[in-house]
Amino acid sequence: MMVCEYKPGLEGIPAAQSSISYVDGQKGILEYRGIRIEELAEKSTFLETAYLLIWGELPSKEELEAFEHEIRHHRRIKYRIRDMMKSFPESGHPMDALQASAAALGLFYSLRDLHNPAYIRDSVVRLIATIPTMVAAFQLMRKGNDPVRPRDDLDYSANFLYMLNEQEPDPLAAKIFDICLILHVEHTMNASTFSARVTASTLTDPYAVVASAVGTLGGPLHGGANEEVIQMLEEIGSVENVRPYVEELIQRKAKIMGFGHRVYKVKDPRATILQNLAEQLFAKFGADKYYDIAQEVERVVEEKLGSKGIYPNVDFYSGLVYRKMGIPTDLFTPIFAIARVAGWLAHWKEQLAENRIFRPTQVYNGKHDITYTPIDQR
Ligand code: SDX
C-alpha cells in the first residue's frame, strides 16, 4: 500500500468528488452549482438556492412553488419535541439545544429506505422546515414564553424572524436575512460538511447526519466565530483601542476571530456582501459604533497580516447584520446552521449516490510490544 504524507487538518487532501460548490481561494470566487454567489445573493431566494444545491438545477416555477408549499406545511414541531426543549436549561447554548433537537427528530422518523427518492425529499423538507422553528422555540422558551406558531402567509425568512420576535419583520430586514441564508448555505468541504459526509457514509439517518454537523459547526474555529467576533468588538470598545488590541493579539500569537481561512487567501466574497448588507441596515435603522470598530480592525489586520493571506471571512460581518436586527449573539451560529442544513443535505444526497464508508488511515506514533504491568507494580 502507498504510504502518504500525514497532513494535519487534511490540508489540501480531497475528501470527496463534488459538483455542489466551488471556491477559488486566490481570486475570491464562490459558486453554487456553477453560479456565482454574487448573482444568487442578488437574484435568488434561500429556498430556491437550497433547491439548486440539493437537486442540482434551478427549479422551474412549478417546482419551486411545490417545494415552498411543502416547506410551509412542515414548519410546525411536534409538541413532544417542544416539551423536550422546554426541559433544557435556559443557560444552555442554543447550538446544543439545536443539536439535541435535530437528533431527537430522528426518533419520530426511524430509518427508512435511503434509496427511495420520496424518503430523501421528505427528510430534506422536514429538516429545512423545522430547524428554524426549533431555534425560535428555544429562544422564546428560555425567556419563559410559549413558542409562536409559524405563519403560513409569511415566506421562509420573514416567518423565522416573526417566530423569533413575535412580530412581523420589516421587509428590508427579512430580505437581508434571506440573503444571509444564501451566503451561508454551502461552502465545499468545510469541517461540518465533512462531518456530515462521514456520518452519511455509514448509511445512518439524515437526522443523525445533521446533528453531527451542527455539533461540528458550533466550535469557535468554524461557525462559532461569528459570536466571538461581536464579543471581541465589544471588548475593544473604541476605534482608538483597535490598534493596540490587535497588536497585542498578534504578539501573543492569538487568533483574531472572523479572520483567516484555509482556502481563501483574499477577502471572503461573502464578507464583502455581508458588509454591504450591514451598511444597508445602518442606512435605514441607524449606525452602529461597532461597525466603525470592525472596519478599523479590518484595516489594521490587513496591514499586519495581509501578506500572510489573513482577511475577513464569512463570520466577520454577519454578526453586525444580525445584531442590527436585534438578534441575540448566541443565536448567530444557530442561524448559520439554519442555512447550512440545506448544504449538508445536498452533500448527504451526493454521498449516498456513490457511497463508500469513510475509513482513512493514521500514522501510528505509539509504542509496540509493551508488556502489561499489574496494577500493584505501577
Ligand atoms: C468558517 O472551511 C470553511 O469553508 C469554513 C467556512 C464555511 O463557510 O463553512 O468558511 C466558515 O468556519 C469561517 C472561519 C471562522 N473561524 C475564525 O474566524 C477563527 C479564526 N480563524 C482561524 O483560526 C483560522 O484562520 C481558520 C481556523 C479559519 C483556518 O485555519 P488553518 O487553515 O488551519 O490556518 P492556521 O491556523 O494553520 O493558520 C495559518 C497561519 C498561522 O501563522 P503561522 O504559524 O504560519 O505564522 O495563519 C495565521 C496562523 O497563526 N492565522 C491567523 C489567523 N488565522 C490564521 N493569525 C491571526 N488571526 C487569525 N484569525
Image (cartoon, rainbow, N blue to C red):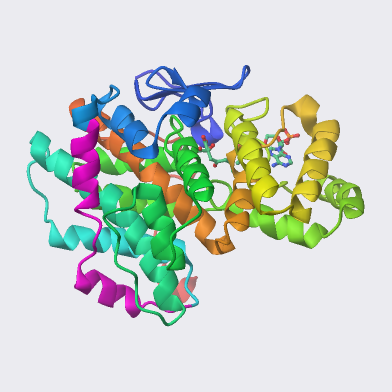
Q: Quick check: 377 above or below 251?
A: below
Q: Is residue 290 magenta?
A: no
Residue occupying the point 85% across, 34% down = 304
Dividing the image into 4 quarters, which one contains the N terminus? top left
Using the rendered image of the protein, determine whether residue 217 is visible from the camera's viewpoint.
no
Quarter of the picture for ligand 1?
A: top right
Asked whether, in this view, residue 341 is left or right of residue 236, the answer is left
Q: Quick check: 3 above or below 233?
A: above
Using the rendered image of the protein, determine whether residue 209 is visible from the camera's viewpoint.
yes
Image quadrant in which you'd find residue 34: top left
Asked whether, in this view, residue 58 is left or right of residue 186, the answer is left
Residue occupying the point 62% across, 17% down = 27
Residue 224: give x, y in percent of width and height: 55, 53
> What range of the chain is rendered magenta?
64-90
Nearest to the observer: residue 200 or residue 57: 57
Residue occupying the point 56% across, 64% down = 328
Q: Is residue 65 magenta?
A: yes
